Amino acid sequence: QVQLVESGGGLVQAGGSLRLSCAASESIFRTYGMGWFRQAPGKEREFVALISWSGSSTYYRDSVKGRFTISRDNAKSTVYLQMNSLKPEDTAVYYCARKGHPLTQAIYHMAAYDYWGQGIQVTVSS
């Protein structure tokens, strides 16, 4: 069955904004940190952001700090990625993923995440 479903991607001009959503099955969402990764053509998948279950702790890759904001609504089992001041280099397929316990172990590594969405395309034109 489908566990994580991303939405909200699309085409935007540089400097614009998009908000990605990831709806999760409650059974896999509860008590876990949730993250976003992205993969550009010809490149490896890379960590973007992570949020703790409570939402009190967030982590970002340096290149998106100050532009992206991760948040979550536990009542809706949904995690969000607000992306502002988008740049062409943000173009990628974006994936949401569930972070295994403990939260802060290996946050940059894909192997530390055990459920993945199918991905959604974000294209930023110059």
Image (cartoon, grey):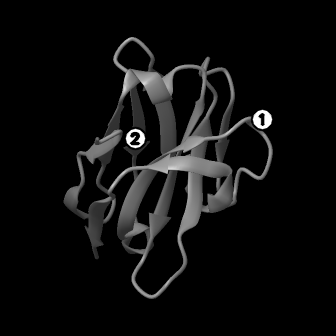
Side of 72 where 100 appears, left or right: right
The N terminus, quarter of image: top left
Q: Which mark is residue 82?
A: 2
Label 1 crowd (10 A; few <14 / some 14-19 / many >=20):
few
Side of 114 where 58 appears, left or right: right
- Residue pushed farthest bottom? 42
Q: Is residue 114 above or below residue 119?
A: above
Q: Give the residue drawn at x 56%, y 55%.
A: 48
Distance, label 2 to label 1, CA atoms, is: 25 Å
Q: Earlier in the sequence, mark 2 or mark 1?
A: 2
Q: Is residue 30 above or below residue 66?
A: above
Side of 73 where 9 appears, left or right: left
Residue type for callout 1: Pro
Secondary structure beneath dot 1 equals loop
Q: Nearer the viewer, residue 78 or 2?
A: 2
Q: Which residue is mark 1?
A: 102
Q: Give the residue drawn at x 37%, y 50%.
A: 117
Q: Is residue 40 above or below residue 90?
A: below
Residue type for callout 2: Gln
